[in-house]
Image: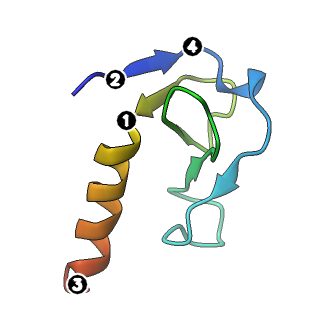
Protein backbone atom coordinates (compact mmCIF):
# COMPACT_ATOMS: atom_id res chain seq x y z
CA UNK A 1 0.00 0.00 0.00
CA UNK A 2 1.35 3.38 -0.98
CA UNK A 3 0.62 6.34 1.26
CA UNK A 4 1.88 9.86 1.34
CA UNK A 5 1.28 12.92 3.42
CA UNK A 6 0.35 16.52 2.81
CA UNK A 7 2.49 18.67 5.15
CA UNK A 8 -0.12 21.45 5.60
CA UNK A 9 -3.65 20.07 5.31
CA UNK A 10 -5.11 23.59 5.48
CA UNK A 11 -4.04 24.07 1.85
CA UNK A 12 -7.01 21.88 0.86
CA UNK A 13 -10.67 22.86 1.24
CA UNK A 14 -13.80 20.78 1.65
CA UNK A 15 -12.92 18.78 4.77
CA UNK A 16 -15.75 17.00 6.56
CA UNK A 17 -15.83 15.53 10.03
CA UNK A 18 -16.12 11.78 10.32
CA UNK A 19 -19.56 10.60 11.38
CA UNK A 20 -17.80 8.57 14.07
CA UNK A 21 -16.30 11.68 15.68
CA UNK A 22 -18.13 13.29 18.54
CA UNK A 23 -19.52 16.83 18.42
CA UNK A 24 -17.72 17.90 21.58
CA UNK A 25 -14.64 19.03 19.64
CA UNK A 26 -12.33 16.29 20.81
CA UNK A 27 -10.70 13.39 19.01
CA UNK A 28 -12.13 14.29 15.61
CA UNK A 29 -11.02 12.92 12.31
CA UNK A 30 -11.72 14.80 9.09
CA UNK A 31 -11.64 13.41 5.57
CA UNK A 32 -11.62 15.03 2.17
CA UNK A 33 -13.64 13.48 -0.64
CA UNK A 34 -12.66 13.70 -4.29
CA UNK A 35 -8.90 14.15 -3.94
CA UNK A 36 -7.18 12.75 -7.05
CA UNK A 37 -4.51 10.86 -5.11
CA UNK A 38 -6.80 9.10 -2.61
CA UNK A 39 -8.46 9.97 0.69
CA UNK A 40 -6.70 12.59 2.83
CA UNK A 41 -7.30 12.22 6.58
CA UNK A 42 -6.36 14.80 9.22
CA UNK A 43 -6.80 15.57 12.92
CA UNK A 44 -9.36 18.37 13.19
CA UNK A 45 -7.58 19.79 16.26
CA UNK A 46 -4.57 20.50 14.04
CA UNK A 47 -5.96 21.77 10.71
CA UNK A 48 -2.61 23.22 9.62
CA UNK A 49 -0.81 19.98 10.43
CA UNK A 50 -0.26 17.08 8.09
CA UNK A 51 -2.82 14.84 6.44
CA UNK A 52 -2.15 11.25 5.49
CA UNK A 53 -3.49 10.25 2.07
CA UNK A 54 -4.73 6.66 1.86
CA UNK A 55 -5.48 4.77 -1.36
CA UNK A 56 -9.25 4.66 -1.95
CA UNK A 57 -9.42 0.84 -1.73
CA UNK A 58 -7.58 0.82 1.59
CA UNK A 59 -9.86 3.54 3.01
CA UNK A 60 -12.98 1.65 1.91
CA UNK A 61 -11.67 -1.53 3.54
CA UNK A 62 -10.99 0.38 6.77
CA UNK A 63 -14.46 1.97 6.82
CA UNK A 64 -16.06 -1.41 6.11
CA UNK A 65 -14.16 -2.99 9.01
CA UNK A 66 -15.19 -0.16 11.37
CA UNK A 67 -18.84 -0.49 10.40
CA UNK A 68 -18.73 -4.27 10.86
CA UNK A 69 -17.03 -4.16 14.26
CA UNK A 70 -19.11 -4.49 17.42
CA UNK A 71 -19.48 -1.32 19.47
CA UNK A 72 -17.59 -1.17 22.71
Q: Which residue is mark 4?
A: 7
Compare marks 3 and 2 and give the one earlier in the sequence. 2
**CA gap, disc 3 and disc 4:** 33 Å
Element type where label 2 sits in the image: loop
> Helix, strand or loop at disc 4?
loop
Q: How many marks?
A: 4
x, y percent for residue 31: 58, 48
Residue at position x 48%, y 34% from top? 38
Residue 72 has which mark? 3
Which residue lies under the disc numbered 2? 3
Q: Quadrant of residue 17?
A: bottom right
* Quadrant including the C terminus: bottom left
Q: Earlier in the sequence, mark 1 or mark 4?
A: 4
Distance from Cα at disc 3 to Cα at disc 2: 29 Å
Q: What residue is shown with label 1?
A: 55
Q: Are marks 2 and 1 in contact (CB under 8 Å)?
A: yes
CB atoms of marks 2 and 4 within 8 Å = no
Amino acid sequence: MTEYSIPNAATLSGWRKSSYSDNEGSECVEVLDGHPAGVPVRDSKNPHGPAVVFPVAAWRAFIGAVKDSPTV
